[in-house]
Image (cartoon, rainbow, N blue to C red):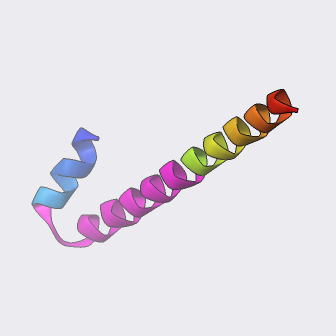
């Protein structure tokens, strides 16, 4: 993460690139947490039956 912070400090073209990378990272975190939640729900509902 230190290289992206340095890119933001420099500004210019690197800022857009790190912003895209940050957006991709956030999207990945949302998708993975949703997948974990769905998996947990499936396991709990399977155990409840």
Quadrant where the C terminus is found in the figure: top right
Image quadrant where residue 17 sits: bottom left
Q: Position of residue 36 (x, y in %)?
A: 63, 40
- Residue 33's x, y, as percent? 55, 45
Question: Where, quadrant-wise, is the N terminus in this rendering?
Answer: top left
Q: Is residue 33 left or right of residue 49?
A: left
Residue 19 within the segment the image draws in magenta: yes
Q: Residue at x 50, y 59 (%)?
A: 27
Q: Main secondary structure of the magenta part?
A: helix
Location of residue 3 by image quarter = top left
Q: Is residue 16 above or below residue 40?
A: below
Give the farthest residue toward the left.
Answer: 9
Query: As displayed, is residue 27 above or below residue 45?
Result: below
* 49 left or right, relative to 11: right
Point out the residue furthest to the top here.
47
Check if residue 34 falls in the magenta segment: no
Q: How many numbered marks appear?
A: 0
Residue under the image location 40 percent in, 58 percent down: 21
Residue 47 position in % (x across, y down): 82, 27
In this view, which residue lies farthest toward the front?
A: 49
Left or right side of 9 for 32: right
Magenta-tinted stretch? 10-31
User: What x and y, as percent, mark residue 7?
Assistant: 21, 56
Q: Quadrant of residue 23?
A: bottom left
Task: Pick the residue in front: 6 or 44.
Answer: 44
Task: Identify the residue at image location x=32%, y=65%.
Answer: 19
User: Which residue occupies the foreground of this view, 30 or 37?
Assistant: 37
Camera-nearest residue between 29 and 45: 45
Identify whether 18 is placed above or below 33. Answer: below
User: In the rendered image of this protein, does residue 49 appear above or below residue 15?
Assistant: above
Identified at 18% across, 59% down, the residue is 8
């Amino acid at each position: 993460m230190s290289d992206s912070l340095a890119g933001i400090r420099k500004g210019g073209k690197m800022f857009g690139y790190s912003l895209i990378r940050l957006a991709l990272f956030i999207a990945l975190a949302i998708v993975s947490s949703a997948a974990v939640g769905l998996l947990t729900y499936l396991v709990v509902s399977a155990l409840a039956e």
